[in-house]
Amino acid sequence: MTTTETDDKLVGDLKTVVKDAQELMDATASQSGAEVSQVRRRLAAALDSAKATCQRLEEKTIATAKATDRVIRDHPYESIGVAFGVGILVGVLIARK
């Protein structure tokens, strides 16, 4: 799994957690009490932090993808050579087992 795929999966998982947390906040909106209010405040803070982290990860993933695309477009033959070499290396390693 590449870094971009890992970041994409992490962003997707983080979005799911944020959505679930928001639904939990909405479901407990009608409940009162000091303990519930405290938990809701902590959850709201964690939710804001998760949203910010998700945004940073998305920006990082996009920047990485653009940088990779730029390098491949600037050096197409070298990119093909590297991909070919890695493919040969992986094939040799798999064949040894």
Image (cartoon, grey):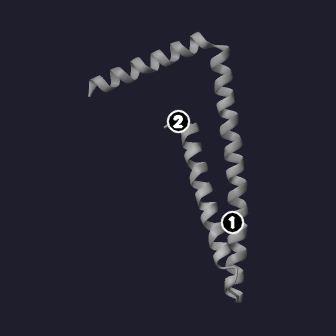
Q: Is residue 43 left or right of residue 94?
A: right
Quadrant of the image occupied by residue 5 = top right
Cα gap from disc 1 to disc 2, whole angstroms: 28 Å
The image quarter containing residue 30 is bottom right
Looking at the image, residue 93 sits to the left or right of residue 56; the answer is: left
Q: Residue furthest top?
A: 77
Q: Which residue is mark 2?
A: 2
Horizontal and vertical percent for residue 20? 60, 65
Q: Which structural element holds mark 1?
A: helix
Q: Amino acid at mark 2?
A: Thr
Q: Are marks 1 and 2 in contact (CB under 8 Å)?
A: no
Q: Nearer the viewer, residue 96 or 55?
A: 55
Compared across the picture, whether 84 is left or right of 65 comes to left
**What residue is drawn where x is 57% and y is 49%?**
10
Vertical placement of residue 59 versus 43, above or below: above
- The image position of residue 79, as x and y in percent, is 57, 16
Residue name at image x 61 percent, y 49 percent: 11
Residue 95 on image: x %, y %: 28, 23
The quadrant holding residue 24 is bottom right
> Where residue 7 sits: x, y (%)?
59, 43
Q: Kindly identify which residue carries mark 1.
A: 46
Looking at the image, the residue that sits furthest to the bottom is 33
Amino acid type, mark 1: Ala
Instruction: State the residue lying farthest toward the left.
Output: 97
Quick one: label 1, few (<14), some, or many (20+) residues within 10 Å?
Answer: some
Category of crowding for the residue at label 2, using alpha-carbon neighbours closer than 10 angstroms: few (below 14), some (14–19), many (at least 20): few
Q: Judging from the image, what secondary structure is the residue with disc 2 in?
A: loop
Quadrant the C terminus occupies: top left
Q: Does 43 sit above or below residue 72?
A: below
Count of picture labels: 2
Answer with mark 1 or mark 2, whichever residue precedes in sequence: 2
Image point (62%, 55%), residue name: 15
